[in-house]
Image (spheres, grey):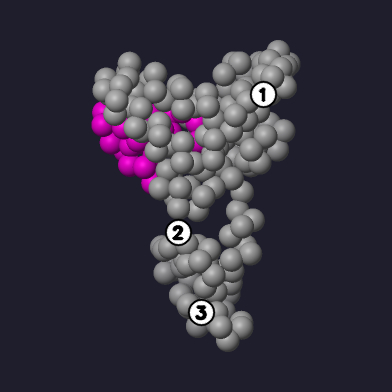
Amino acid sequence: MSADKASTQANLSEGKTHFSRRLALAEAGEEIVITKAGKPAAKLQQTMITRLSRTFLDTNVLVYCDDESEPVKQKRALEVLDEHTRLRTGVVSLQVLQEYFVTATRKLGLDPGTARRKVEIFAMLHVAEPTVIDILASIDLHRYQGFSYWDALVLRMAKQAGCRVVLSEDMQHGQEIDGVTIVNPFL
């Protein structure tokens, strides 16, 4: 460790409990040493944080952020959104933002002005924008692997944005497509 860098030590159980906070400190340039039985067991550094993979958030994750009829899923969705916003690893697509607006206004009854503001907030994540090539690739994924076209477009945009994970409850949990794993964050 260089003399000009700050260093923080935390025991293993504290490190697990406050992992997100520790990552934020490491991202800011502080070296974090996790100890086990008083001995260094792991070190978090800024270079490690930049290697964290992006994660694609499907529409249902955003919708649950506003769905008061599902308090457990709402809490989890807000945690996911907060984590990926802080770590700057969250990705959505234009499709997801559009689907959020329609679902929030129709299903949840959100005022269109409020839903619009939420779209602006969600757009602070990385936004993947499809091209014609992405649309054609999604059609092929639909044709050859049986995904709905819209799910295929989500998977394609996740791949194009460098995501290793798609968080969605609408697709098969644990399935891997072209290096992208589908994870249901509500299980």
In the rendered image, residue 73 lying in the magenta stretch gets the answer yes
Question: Which residue lies at the image location 53% right of the left edge and 63% below the top edge?
Answer: 27
Which numbered circle lies on residue 7? 3
Task: Tell me the CA gap for discs 1 and 2.
Answer: 34 Å
In terms of depth relative to the viewer, which is nearer, 174 or 165?
165
Q: Closer to the N terminus: mark 1 or mark 3?
A: 3
Disc 2: which residue: 20
Answer yes or no: is residue 147 visible: yes
Q: Amino acid at mark 1?
A: Thr
Q: For the residues carrying marks 1 and 2, which lies nearer the camera in this image?
A: 1
Per the rendered image, the range of residues in magenta is: 57-79
Splitting the image into 4 quarters, where does residue 147 fall? top right
Residue 129 locus on image (x, y percent): 60, 29
Q: Amino acid at mark 2?
A: Ser
Tell me, yes or no, whether the two marked residues, 1 and 2, touch with CB atoms within 8 Å. Answer: no
In terms of depth relative to the viewer, which is nearer, 90 or 126?
126
